[in-house]
Image (cartoon, grey):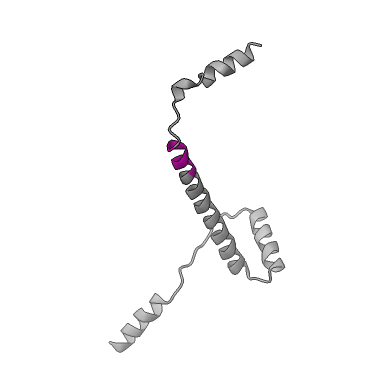
Amino acid sequence: MHANKGYIACMEDVMPTLQVRDLPEDIYTQIKYLAEKEHRSLAQETIVLLQEGITKRLQNKERRRKLLEEISNLDIDGNKYPDPVELIREDRER
């Protein structure tokens, strides 16, 4: 019974594993190059690249959300301005 508790506790400390199938050769080569340049293993470099990509994407989404919120708070009356479609048509007819 005690051995089973030890096994469960040990399993909680295990990091998840990700397997990527059909990884394009050029991506593998680039990761390998970066890993060597940064003195990291392939796994370490892959984790760094994933974290950087995730962080950047989340920051971009948050920045877009804030920008859209700021735009909606400007209280601009769209009826005061000409229709962009009409402006484009007028420009094309010149």
Main secondary structure type of the part rendered in magenta: helix
Query: Would you say 12 lies left or right of 34 here?
Result: left
Q: Can see residue 72?
A: yes
Measured from the top left, where is residue 56 in percent x and y?
55, 54
Q: Quadrant of residue 40?
A: bottom right
The structure residue drawn at horizontal position 57% and vertical position 54%, both measured from the top left corner, is: 22
Please provide percent x and percent y for residue 15.
Answer: 46, 72
> In this view, which residue lies farthest toward the left?
1
The quarter of the displayed image where residue 47 is located: bottom right
Name the residue rendered at 32%, 83% in the picture. Answer: 5
Which quadrant is home to the C terminus? top right
Taking the magenta stretch, the answer to whether it contains residue 68 is yes
Relative horizontal placement of residue 37, taking residue 84 as reference (left or right): right
Please tell me whether residue 8 belongs to the stretch shown in magenta: no
Q: Nearest the camera: 9 or 82?
A: 82
The residue lying at 54 percent from left, 16 percent from top is 86
Which portion, as a residue range, is magenta? 67-73
Residue in the image at 59% along x and 60% along y:
49
Looking at the rendered structure, the number of numbered marks drawn on it comes to 0
Rendering coords of residue 88 (x, y %): 58, 18
Q: Is residue 90 above or below residue 1?
A: above
Residue 57: horizontal and vertical position, in percent?
53, 51
Closer to the camera in the image, 76 or 5: 76
Q: Is residue 21 visible?
A: no
User: Which residue lies most toward the bottom here?
Assistant: 2
Q: Is residue 37 above or below residue 5?
A: above
